[in-house]
Image (cartoon, rainbow, N blue to C red):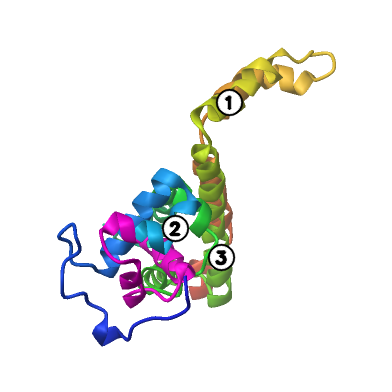
Amino acid sequence: MADRVTPEPQRRRRRPTKQGTVLSEHIIVDTALRLVGLHGAQALTVRRLGAALGADPSAIYRYFRSTDDLLLAIADELIGRAQHGWQSTGDWRADLRAIGLRIHSAYLAHPQAALLAAHRTTGRDHEILAVESILGVLRSAGFPDPEAVRIYHALVDQSLAFAALDAAALALPAPAQAADLGVWQSRYARLDPGSHPNIAATAELLTADMRRSGYPFALALLLDAIAARLPDRSAERGRPSE
């Protein structure tokens, strides 16, 4: 896809496509998400996207400079979906937990797209709003700015890393998913307690736990660590008078 784009005022397509749709950035991104979900990364081409939209592929250049520009828009759309409906409660821990779980869930709803987009920085509206919101939660809780930035970094990287890991598992063909999970029962659960006493002692627990994402517990651990770093604001104000 060439690195060229139509100026903003000229972008809107005045005539509907063959399918009766008036193109927009949102429609293109939504269609791209659907194609990637069905066919993987190879579906992200101008030709296939144009065919799905019922439009000449060149019409997409009115909205995106390149496939990478489109990919960034897809990444930003996933971030936007994670934020949709979220409102701060004023409880920093509850707010960060909700944000983390929303990010993870939004990417897992589109595992093929998550593999392409979880590691990208978009600089677009939804991402900017997410950064602003998370930093706002942390600064309002009383974290100094350097600490707020480091916690933001750790929180977002953790959620996206788990999203990419879990998305990769979901993107596997069903037989491969089943085979991977079956290893815990067929191999680990049968190890000799004499040579592998720790695995043998916990094999049943391992088999059950490895069937679900480790993210919610990892997030709880991170939030515990964050809480331990929260400045004691009562100490800063001085001890209350007796």
The disc, 2 or 3, on the residue closer to the chain's N-terminal end is: 2
Which residue is identified by label 3?
Answer: 153
x and y percentages locating residue 34 in the rendered image? 35, 50
Q: How many marks?
A: 3
Which residue is identified by label 2?
Answer: 44
How far apart, in angstroms, are the residues tagged by discs 2 and 1? 30 Å
Q: Residues within 10 Å of mark 1 (few under 14, many from 20)?
A: some
Check the image and report above or below for 163 versus 157: above
* Residue 90, quarter of the rendered image: bottom left
Q: Relative to 34, is 221 on the left or the right?
A: right
Which residue is identified by label 1?
Answer: 181
Check the image and report above or below for 53 versus 143: above
- Magenta extent: 50-78
Q: Residues within 10 Å of mark 2 (few under 14, many from 20)?
A: some
Q: Residue at the location (44% across, 60% down)? A: 45
The disc, 2 or 1, on the residue closer to the chain's N-terminal end is: 2
